[in-house]
């Protein structure tokens, strides 16, 4: 029960003023610019764009600055801003096969056409703190370059598909459901699950994916391919009558190759899980593809082992960190009246208990 | 030029303008000899576009998330030439310049506009893409077989 009360305005104003001061920190230290955050904390910016579900690096950098580096608070700011924008339309589905790959690796084929391209990766670093970064003024030496070739990088699933070894993903003309327009309902089709996972909390999706690896809904996933780079976004413009490129975005895509389906009539085939995320976010893309695959148990005729990662309502209803934090954090706001009634109830129970106990003690 | 070639050419310059950095577009537009007067058909407007992906990269579409886009449309004064601006991000001045360039590219000024604005933008874009592609190429793995199990 909520009861309107007044008061606290001055305290709130002063709290916000202090927050602004704390956000700035020691004024003897140079202030962070939006450009610095966008360029030097790019992976934080990527996460805010992915889970804020709005691709705009400058806005995400501003949100990170305003939120003092609290990424979930920054995501909240982006989600709130997003609701103020008129929707101009939807893009053509992006062609990730035509991605300008900065990174492209496969854990299943060593010599794949187009090669293994490591890109700017933390993999193979020793995870030792680099104290050279603590010293200012040392610009990193330019990265080595090699002649770029235009060798196409076909999808791993495409060449497995040539032998019929992997399931195909049927195309469809039906407009996909949009959970920003209609509330999430169950059972959710795969397109809706993918949208929900793409904006879901990285930590939650990682935990769910990890649970499948540990045996709770195991899917025997290999990373068939992981690619990261720029793709063009095209949109049909009604007044022009044709589609034009309206932007270029960085995406990370993961395709897993998983254990088989097949029957007496159909030969065994590998199955697939899919992850696609705004920005450079491999952990999220791999996690998403594992969870996507685990949620397909019914479609693929697998056993429901009761694993959390197989329960779409459990996964999708708890993947959104803004919904979760909203409900979680609201309990710190005044609940004086709710609590008052609980307090009275406890006092009454205790009083009744002591009354009942007293005559016995007297006997 | 055929209709299809015209459409392809316009698609190309509109795509180039959509991602052109605001400061270099402004600097290049300043070099244009004359900036014609125009009337707004649709003043610059910031909005979002829902970006779609495909399941498994090639299958049924799904909604991935939105991106910010600014659009506008203008008509050159004293003519029926209409220019459209669709640019990534939230910069209204950029959208206006894009629409103006789109309009001018449909006039006699097209050759000069191409040389002054579009060609330098395309060169800068190609150079930036090439620089990233070269860095990526330098991280391509060359495998050496150390020992084989069957030996």
Image (cartoon, coloured by chain):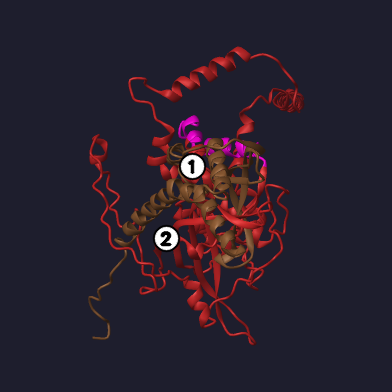
Chain colours: A red, B brown
- Magenta span: A62-86
Badge 2 element? strand
The residue closer to the viewer here, A13 or B68, is: B68
Q: Who is closer to the viewer here, A223 or A205?
A: A223
A281 on left or right of B63: left
Q: In this view, does A60 lie above or below A246?
A: above
Q: In which quarter of the image is residue A78?
A: top right
Residue A102 x, y percent position in the rendering: 39, 58
Q: Can residue A121 be seen in this view?
A: no
Which of the pair A363/B128 is nearer the observer? B128
Between the residue at mark 2 and the residue at mark 1, the CA separation in whole angstroms equals 20 Å
In the rendered image, residue B120 lying in the magenta stretch gets the answer: no
* Image location of residue A340, percent across then percent down: 72, 23
Query: Mark 2 belongs to which subunit?
Result: A
The residue shown at (49%, 57%) is A231
Read off the residue under disc 2: A101
Q: How many marks?
A: 2
Instruction: Name the residue: 56% across, 66% down.
Output: B56
Q: Would you say A92 lies left or right of A339 here?
A: left
Residue B87 relative to residue B80: left or right: left
Quadrant location, the C terminus of chain B: bottom left
Give the labeled residue for mark 1: A57
Label 2 environment density (alpha carbons within 10 Å; few <14, some 14–19, many ≥20): many
Quadrant for the N terminus of chain B, please. Answer: bottom right
Q: For the point 45% across and 25% down, which residue is it?
A: A23
Q: Are marks 2 and 1 on the same chain?
A: yes
């Amino acid at each position: 029960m909520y009861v309107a009360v007044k008061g606290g305005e001055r305290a709130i104003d002063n709290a916000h003023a202090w927050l602004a001061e704390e956000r700035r920190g020691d004024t003897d230290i140079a202030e962070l610019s939006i450009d610095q955050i966008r360029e030097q904390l790019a992976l934080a910016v990527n996460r805010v764009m992915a889970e804020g579900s709005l691709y705009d690096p400058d806005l995400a950098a501003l949100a990170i600055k305003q939120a003092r580096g609290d990424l979930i608070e920054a995501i909240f700011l982006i989600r709130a801003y997003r609701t103020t924008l008129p929707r101009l339309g939807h893009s053509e589905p992006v062609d990730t096969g035509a991605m300008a790959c900065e990174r492209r690796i496969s854990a299943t084929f060593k010599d794949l056409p187009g090669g293994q391209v490591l890109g700017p990766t933390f993999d193979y670093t020793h995870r030792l703190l680099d104290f050279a970064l603590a010293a200012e003024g040392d610009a990193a030496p330019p990265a080595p370059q090699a002649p770029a070739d235009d060798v196409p990088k076909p999808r791993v699933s495409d060449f497995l598909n040539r032998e019929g070894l992997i399931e195909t993903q049927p195309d469809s003309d039906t407009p996909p459901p949009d959970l920003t327009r209609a509330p999430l309902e169950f059972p959710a089709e795969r397109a809706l699950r993918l949208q929900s996972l793409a904006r879901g909390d990285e930590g939650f999706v990682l935990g769910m994916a990890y649970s499948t690896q540990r045996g709770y809904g195991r899917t025997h996933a290999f990373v068939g391919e992981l690619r990261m780079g720029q793709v063009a976004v095209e949109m049909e413009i009604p007044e022009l009558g044709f589609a034009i490129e309206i932007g270029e975005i960085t995406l990370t895509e993961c395709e897993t190759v998983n254990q088989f389906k097949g029957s007496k009539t159909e030969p065994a085939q590998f199955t697939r899980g899919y992850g696609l995320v705004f920005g450079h976010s491999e952990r999220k893309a791999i996690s998403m593809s594992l969870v996507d695959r685990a949620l397909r148990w019914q479609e693929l005729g697998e056993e429901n082992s009761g694993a959390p990662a197989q329960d779409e309502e459990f996964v999708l209803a708890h993947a959104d960190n803004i919904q979760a934090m909203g409900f979680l954090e609201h309990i710190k706001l005044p609940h004086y009246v709710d609590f008052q009634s609980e307090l009275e109830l406890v006092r009454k129970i205790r009083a009744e208990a002591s009354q009942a106990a007293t005559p016995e003690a007297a006997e | 030029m055929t209709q299809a070639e015209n459409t392809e050419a316009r698609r190309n310059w509109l795509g180039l303008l959509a991602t052109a950095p605001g400061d270099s577009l402004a600097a290049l537009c300043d070099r244009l000899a004359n900036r014609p007067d125009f009337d707004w058909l649709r003043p610059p407007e910031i909005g979002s576009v829902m970006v779609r992906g495909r399941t498994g990269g090639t299958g049924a579409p799904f909604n991935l998330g939105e991106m910010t886009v600014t659009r506008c449309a203008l008509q050159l004064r004293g003519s029926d030439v209409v220019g459209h601006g669709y640019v990534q991000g939230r910069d209204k001045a950029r959208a206006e310049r894009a629409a103006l360039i789109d309009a001018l590219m449909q006039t006699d000024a097209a050759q000069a506009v191409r040389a002054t604005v579009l060609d330098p933008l395309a060169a800068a874009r190609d150079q930036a893409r090439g620089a990233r592609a070269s860095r990526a190429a330098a991280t391509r793995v060359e495998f050496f077989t150390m020992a084989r199990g069957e030996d």
